Image (spheres, rainbow, N blue to C red):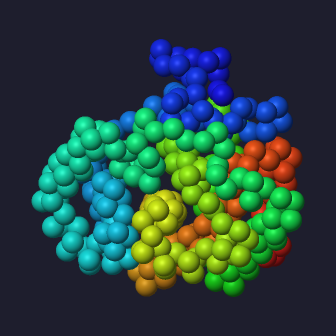
Amino acid sequence: MRGDGSSGDGTSDEPSTLHAGPLQVEGRGDLDFSRAVLEKLYSYPLKRRSIAYLLWLLTGLFGGHRLYLDRTGTGLLMLFTVGGGGLWTLIDVFLIGKMVRKFNADQVQREYEGLAPRQLAFMPAKGEALPSEPYWAAKRSTRVRLVADSIVLMVAAGSMGAFARQSGVYEPIIAVAALIAITLLGTRWDALAELPILRGFDRWAHRLRLFYYTNDPGGALSLAFRQVLAFFAFFRKRRRAEVRLYLQLGAWFTIIFIGLDLIQAFGIGSSGGFNPGSLAVDMFQTFFATYAFAAPIGAILNKHVLLQRSDRVIWVLSAGAVVFMAFGLF
């Protein structure tokens, strides 16, 4: 566990009743399902109207305010329709207050009923006990399965590099590289996880790891076709949670890249050459490529982090993904 057993705010870092957790082993990453971390993840944060309006102002055309209010589906629809041609964005300014109140009321109700908060809806209630290791660990920990997962990881990374080379869209590579860093961040680079922006990514990575802790990531074959299987997630509540986590990642990175493109197009010293059609194509390609390649790579890395592979194995897997991305790219 992190630190010296204290979170610094009076909260104990000892394992919670929710998760006794595997003991930290020297030479392996710290999963850090400590009481302090789980208290933060299992909190019931309310949304602020001022932040929702600010996101509407800055990213309203791309649904950023709806993503913030946990409306992933309509947020993505706004992203792909550019706010319904701007009309939907204008209408939303009158709906934000209602959406904030509805989110907060649901969060308060979930806390009252002892349910997991909205951001952890796929998890059991806070007081329920979990096994000391994932129930699927014995089935997925053989060396043969490690080799098969490694092959899938390298193929996915190489395919992403080839896609970037052929399409000229390189943003997904940055997003997936960030995903790899985020995965390592939560278990290896404790200090970076306390920085303001990275803290949010670290919490997202913890939610993803908690999901895989209680849900079998699957074998190499299902990991290789993660994108195809996502279409069937509608029929399985818990798999919808996995898809949603990756959609959130893809959407936020897409919004960031679109914002950078707009700044470049209209910034000081720019030529003013702005092509909405080209931007729309880049947006679609960035989002779908980020999701398509982040899902198998993220699942494989988190799977072997949860299996408590040695640092050497995790670093080799991560480095292999980066190397094969480079091979596909060049």
Q: Residue at x 27, y 41 (%)?
A: 113
In the image, 289 versus 156, the foreground residue is: 156
Left/right placement of residue 96 relative to residue 17 reads left
Q: How many marks on residues?
A: 0
> Does the image show residue 60?
yes
Relative vertical location of residue 81 with respect to residue 119 in this rendering, above or below: below
Is residue 55 or residue 176 the one in the foreground?
176
Relative image position of residue 171 (x, y in whole percent): 60, 68
Give the x, y percent position of residue 42. 42, 38
Residue that appears at 86% across and 65% down: 144
**Foreground pick, 163 / 10:** 10
Asked if residue 178 lies left or right of residue 316, the reply is left
- Residue 167, given in percent of the width and then of the height, sits at 64, 83
Q: Quadrant of the N terminus?
A: top right
From where the camera sits, is residue 273 visible? no
Give the position of the C terminus as an image quadrant.
bottom right
Residue at (61% x, 18% y) in the render: 5
The x and y percentages for residue 133 are 66, 44
The residue under the point 40% across, 42% down is 125
